[in-house]
Image (cartoon, coloured by chain):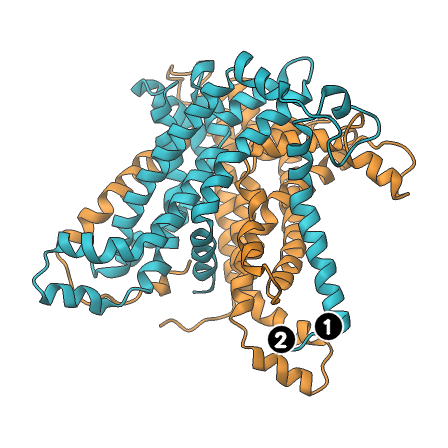
Chain colours: A cyan, B orange
Amino acid sequence: MKRGLAGTAALLLGLLVLALVVLFPMWAVLSSSIKLPREIIHRIPTYFPKSFTLQHYQKLLATSDFPAYFGNSLVVALLSAAITVALATLAGYAFFRLEFRGRELIYRMVMVAYAFPSIVILIPIYLMFAKLGLIDTRTALVIVNVTFALPFSIWMMRTFFAALPHELEEAAAIDGASLFETARYVLVPLLGPGMASIAVFAFVSSWTEYLFASVLILSDAKRTIPVGLSGIIGQYQIDWGLLLAGASLSILPVVVFFAFVGRFFVSGLTEGAVK
Amino acid sequence: MTPKTLRPARRSAGLLPYLLIAPALGLLAATLVIPIVSAVDISLHDIRVIGAAGPFSGADNYLRVLADPTFWAALGTSAVWVVGNALVQTLLAVIAALVLDQRFPGVRIARVWIILTWIVPTVVIVIIWRWLLSPSGGLVNPLLIQLGLIDRPVGFFASGPMAMTSLILINSWRWFPFVAVMLLAALQRIPADVYEAAAVDGANPLQRFFAITWPLLKPTLLVLTVMGTLLSFNVFDVIWLLTAGGPAGATRTLPVLIYETAFKAYRMGDAAAMSVIASLLMIGLAVMLLETLAPKEKRS
């Protein structure tokens, strides 16, 4: 359909507002993280940096535990993503490909998991992990993050299985491929985008998780970025340069990760929503 | 998200499906089902010291919680929080989805990167907005003064209503692109010829929106409202890190109160009782929303 002049103007205005709303805060943080301290706190703000320094980054990497937080977050997020992808793909195959007793009931129960506020399980998980000796371990965070990502991931997998024709597996079976071979050479390559989008979801959920990481981790060396950075905020004198550098570096990995597989995630999200 | 979408499978596969779902179900049983059962158990005991078993106290914790005005205040705050977020996010998301539904150069990139605010850790969102909104050195106050909207710097977290509004806007900023992306899919399913027919019949854009777009968006909006209600009720970190429930408890939602009760006051039993009540409310609310708002669908 052709757009009139008014329509084009409205679209441009909408785009401009969206871009400002989403990008301006990000730009403000990134650009200010390389300003000299006096420019950051100057009464008249600058939208483009007039000074340039890497002192905040140097201070962050040399004098704070940020590198350790970063490493912990990365390990926990990568492990959570890998395990979530494996569990959700296996379960997805059963739910969306096979016939078995109780299928619908079990699927519903998995989805109901979302109705429970996560704060409900915080206390029991804390007590249970204390008994198992899992408090103050990164394993505890991986377990919790996979739990939270799993139901939504299984749900997202549905679209990707629906897009695969049953005939593919039947053809593979006729050609004498074993179940494992069918999975390895037919299903996994075709489910790649689905697995990538689950990986994004699990990685991002884990990378941003604060509540459980703040309760289950005690020692500073094992903190993840959200808890570690919040500790830096809490210190008596807020050092904005340091925090803005930390914020910039925390955005970086998810942006890089998202640049590669983000489009699969968004298509998984959109196609799942309408079916 | 509805079970009706499970399509009939071709063959019965014996034990295999159970083996495939076993790892996922095993994990969820250990980390969701057992803890939920155990939350109920804890809520019936007088537990003060972490790790030590307290004496059975029946409904005492529940009675104490229900008699506590702080609990009811937190419940009210949570209601304001959930409704505020639903309204702001839906409004922003519908606008964003309508914009992204158009054709323009770079639209594919825009549709992916709109979600940028959602992939950023909450603590970074907290840093961004605490800095942008701070009365000294933040960018928002000078901007509003320049635009002539305010005369002097505003304390965005100074009063209860201001703090609540700021929090709702910040949390909505984080989540609206996620909702927008899901709405976009529903928009794209609406065939273009419906709009063209309406345009030929002389319907203006506004009439087209309310006669065609809105009714067709409603089912998706319903699912998203239910999901969004559950998700935003749960939000703890943004509130805790920005206001810690203050000023004077004005932003102390139920999750914040539960956290304080459990990990600041160490009253595990009371906190568990509150969380059980919260779960029942949430499940009830989700069922009610789905039952009353859902269009009656035929099952396939």
Is residue A88 visible in this depiction of the protein? yes
Give the tally of numbered discs: 2
Q: Which mark is residue B212?
A: 2
Q: Is residue B18 left or right of residue B106?
A: left
Between residues A181 and A95, which one lies in front from this camera angle?
A181
Q: Residue at x 48, y 71 (%)?
A: B296
Q: Earlier in the sequence, mark 1 or mark 2?
A: 1
Q: Can you name the residue that lies furthest to the left here?
A: A176
Q: Residues within 10 Å of mark 1 (few under 14, many from 20)?
A: few
Q: Which mark is residue B57?
A: none
- Counting from the top left corner in percent of width and height, residue B57 is at 44, 23
Spatial CA distance of label 1 from label 2 is 10 Å
- Counting from the top left corner in percent of width and height, residue B141 is at 82, 35
Q: Is residue B120 left or right of residue A28?
A: left
Q: Residue at x 58, y 23 (%)?
A: A230
Where B226 sits versus A214, above or below?
below
Q: Chain of mark 1?
A: B
Inspect the image, locate mark 2, and give the three-letter code of the amino acid beneath it. Answer: Ile
* Circles 1 and 2 on the same subunit: yes
Q: Residue at x 52, y 46 (%)?
A: B230
Q: Can you name the residue that lies furthest to the bottom here?
A: B201
Between residues B128 and A24, which one lies in front from this camera angle?
A24
Contact, mark 1 vs mark 2 (Cβ under 8 Å): no
- Counting from the top left corner in percent of width and height, residue A71 is at 42, 24
Inspect the image, locate mark 1, and give the three-letter code of the amino acid beneath it. Answer: Leu
Q: Residue at x 62, y 22 (%)?
A: A54
Q: Which residue is labeled 1 in the image?
A: B206
SS at mark 2 in the image: helix
- Counting from the top left corner in percent of width and height, residue B282 is at 51, 45
